[in-house]
Amino acid sequence: MKNPKKFFVVTVTIALLLASTAIVLANENSISLPWIHKADSETDKLREDKSLGIGEWKRKSLEISGELPKDAKRLTVESAVKIISEKKNVEDVIVEFNKIAGAPDFEGGSGLHRAIYYLDEQREEAIYVLAGKVMHVTFGKDGSETIKPLAEDISSKTSPTAEPK
């Protein structure tokens, strides 16, 4: 820079930005705004929950942030079967599922995309979308799982194979 005054102002500005960033990073755990801390602790618990492997508890995160109402509709087997019969690929199916449910309860995977839509708050039934397949899963009280395919492979556009309850 040819102008020493301008050089000084830019240098001081950068130094102040670096110093303020260092202060915030050093004190980030001591910020004590209760409404922020509550949301952060709930969000932190969700981030730490790896019970279903690599992924994100998307629906609950959106509820905590206020982006999705806590009483948002849930997907049903009947609506899932109807959507699958009308759509050509898995991406379109997921878009339509999300129009009803807002977001999957859980989304993630390691190499294969997996979206889980629980049909109830008790997590007794779910619609799984995994590798182009859509399944209706029922969880028994004894820990068992009953899996019924709704579509074998959406990418090849097979028709639904399971009838709604």
Image (cartoon, grey):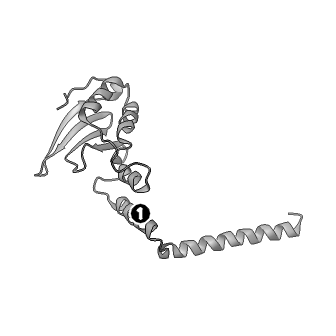
Q: Position of residue 109 (x, y in %)?
A: 35, 47
Q: Residue 100: which quarter of the image?
A: top left
Q: At 13% from the left edge and 51% from the top edge, which residue is drawn?
A: 143
* Quadrant containing the N terminus in the rendered view: bottom right
Q: Which residue is mark 1?
A: 39
Q: Position of residue 101 (x, y in %)?
A: 35, 41
In this image, 63 relative to 12: left or right? left
* Quadrant containing the C terminus in the rendered view: top left
Q: At 37% from the left edge and 63% from the top edge, which residue is drawn?
A: 42
Total marks drawn? 1
In this image, 116 relative to 39: left or right? left
Q: At 87% from the left edge and 69% from the top edge, which residue is drawn?
A: 4
Spot the residue most to the left: 142
**Residue type indicated by callout 1:** Ala
Residue 109 shows in this picture: no
Q: Residue 158: which quarter of the image?
A: top left
* Rendered position, 20 above or below 112: below
Q: Position of residue 43 (x, y in %)?
A: 39, 61
In this image, 9 relative to 155: left or right? right
* Rendered position, 157 above or below 25: above
Q: At 24% from the left edge and 36% from the top edge, which residue is drawn?
A: 135
* Rendered position, 5 above or below 141: below
Q: Position of residue 102 (x, y in %)?
A: 38, 42
**Badge 1: how crowded within 10 Å, few (<14), some, or many (20+)?**
some
Q: Residue 103: which quarter of the image?
A: top left
Question: Helix, strand, or loop for circle 1?
Answer: helix
Residue 13 shows in this picture: yes
